[in-house]
Amino acid sequence: MQNQKPKLSYWFITAGTIWLVLALAHLYYTKTEVFFYLHGEENTPFDYIMYLGTHLGDGWVVLPVFVFLFFKESLSKALAFGLAFGFSGLITQVLKRTVFKEIQRPSSYLGEDLIRTVDWVDLHSMHSFPSGHTTAAFALCLSLAFIYRNKYAQIGFALLAWFIGYTRVYIGQHFPVDLLGGAVVGILITVLIFTWERKWPEKLKYRPL
């Protein structure tokens, strides 16, 4: 009988606490007020960190993480990550372009003259909610938390997911409320996929190394 892996309590407590605080902020302040509070002041050295960090939510991360999980863990874990990342991203893009297609990004809602822009970033104008990069970040980090359940790793992955999401506000691409929606999509789809993965046939548990 295999030892049961630790639960994901640390990941969900960490990520959930931040989500709740951000959601509660929107009950007392407008989305514009929350945006300006988190958007930051004049350009700082953090611009470089935030610019690089935001790309951790890009699609390029799929291949290296998939390959790593395939060789280090198993085919099923790699496939589960790929499906969680892909399906959550697809759902977010559909929502952006159908249900929430009229929701503007900060640059068009507020005007670019009111936003502290970061060099090298081309601001988008529409399809703000939910945040696709935040969806990707939560799919990535929760997938890793499902696989590597050390409590410190869980906390680290939860903070990393929110860091990637926060970069979207910092560089002026999203309102904080967009992060809330993106996080929900990423979490729900990843939980469903990894719960399903437990029932996959043993031949998919193949581990090459």
Image (cartoon, grey):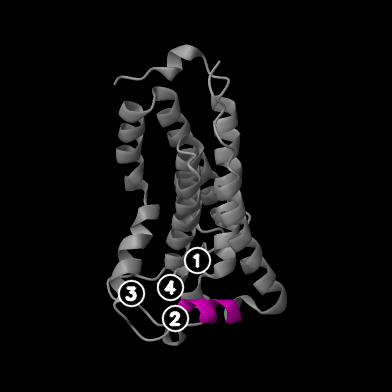
Q: Counting residues from the N terminus, which is met first, the one under dot 1 or under dot 4?
A: 1
The chief SS type of the magenta part is helix
Q: Secondary structure at mark 3?
A: helix
Give coordinates of residue 181: x percent, y percent.
Answer: 60, 57
Residue tagged 3: 46
* Distance from the alpha carbon under mark 4 to that under mark 3: 9 Å
Task: Estimate how packed mark 3 is, as few (under 14), some (14 to 19) or many (20 or more) residues with alpha carbons within 10 Å.
Answer: few
* Tag 2: amino acid: Gly
* CB contact under 8 Å: marks 3 and 2: yes
Question: Which stretch did the figure color magenta?
Answer: 33-40
- The kind of residue tagged 1 is Met
Query: Mark 4 against mark 3, which lies toward the viewer?
Result: 3
Residue 197: percent from the left, percent from the top? 54, 26
Does any portion of residue 116 appear in the rendered image?
A: yes
Question: Residue pushed farthest right?
Answer: 27
Residue drawn 40% across the image and 53% down it: 57
